[in-house]
Image: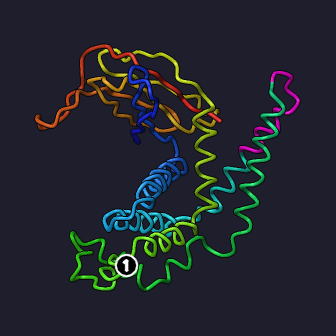
Amino acid sequence: MEAVQDNQQDPVARQVLYEHPLNERVRTFLRLEYLFTQAAYHVKRGSEWDSRATLTCILEILSIFGNANLKSEVLKELERHAFGLKRLEHNPDIDIRQLTGLLDAIANHIDSLHRINGQIGSELKSSEFLISIRQRSAIPGGTCDFDLPAFHYWLQQPAKERTDDLYRWLNSFDAIGQAIQFILKLTRESTTLKPAIADDGVYQKTLDPNLPYQLVRIALPAGSPYFAELSGGRHRFTARFLNFSTIENRARQTDEDVEFGLACCVI
């Protein structure tokens, strides 16, 4: 489950969004989106600690890419969306201009991925500098100055030099990162949030297995005393609403009825 803060300016309208992937592909996409977003935040800042945080994101992204053929997975997902959208071309209720724009965007992402030669991030996997940091990162405090003097030296270089290196490494994932963010945008926008009620703090829903459900989204007001805990898969899911506390040993499920926004994204 992923929690996402909606960045609306009106504090009354602000919501906290909780997302739960319904298949492994979307789960991986959400994790990569999280890492890309975190890296984009820190890379713009010049402190040593921001450079450390950015590099940690890059190494985690690299680990995910080492465990799956993500280029193939993203291409399959883009082609699936293109096939589904093309079936709408003769629907009189469809905005043809918007549909054409989406199909062109999908085609551009597919072309960008086909232009990538070899495995994504392969040059980073062979970097002795990055390998040494990655190995020590598995040890608590393992990237301390005395453990990695080369890393310590790099962190003392001018901010522009460090930032240039970080952008160069991140650019290895630029095409596939943009494609993943585009797929998630299509998924989220495929369904609008609708009012729902969790009786006694619990909501359960059975999903039609014949429909390609991808993602469950739950919205709560930013000032709500509850957070949503989601579980389930492509056939059904459960949402439990719990009172948050850092003092008690564990969060407790509320026994009150909870109103929330719900979107079961199918595309």
Say what amino acid the circle numbered 1 marks.
Gln
**Residue at 52% in and 68% down:** 167
Examine the structure image and report whether residue 103 is included in the region drawn in magenta: no
The range drawn in magenta is 81-93
> Up-down: is 174 above or below 251?
below
Q: How is the image coloured?
A: rainbow
| Residue 253, placed above or below residue 197 | below
Corner quadrant of residue 136: bottom left
Q: Residue at x 54, y 72 (%)?
A: 168
Quadrant in which the N terminus is drawn: top left
> Is residue 185 placed above or below 149 in the rendered structure?
above
Where residue 222 sits, quadrant-wise, is top left
Residue 199 left/right relative to 9: left
Q: Secondary structure at mark 1?
A: loop
Q: Position of residue 174 (x, y in %)?
A: 60, 62
Residue that numbered label 1 is attached to: 157
Which residue is pictured at 85% across the width and 33% down the height? 89
* Of the pair 12 and 159, the residue shown nearer to us: 159
Neighbours of disc 1 within 10 Å: few (<14), some (14-19), many (20+) = few
Residue 200 at what x, y percent from top left? Answer: 29, 16
* Residue 161 drawn at (x, y percent): 45, 76
Q: How many badges with numbers are in the image?
A: 1
Front one among 32 and 98: 98
Tell me what residue is drawn at x 55 percent, y 51 percent: 25
Lateral position of residue 84 relative to residue 161, left or right: right
Q: Position of residue 219 (x, y in %)?
A: 43, 26
Left or right of residue 68, residue 10 in this image? left
Q: Residue furthest right?
A: 90
Where does the C terminus fall, quadrant-wise? top right
Who is closer to the viewer here, 201 or 98? Answer: 98
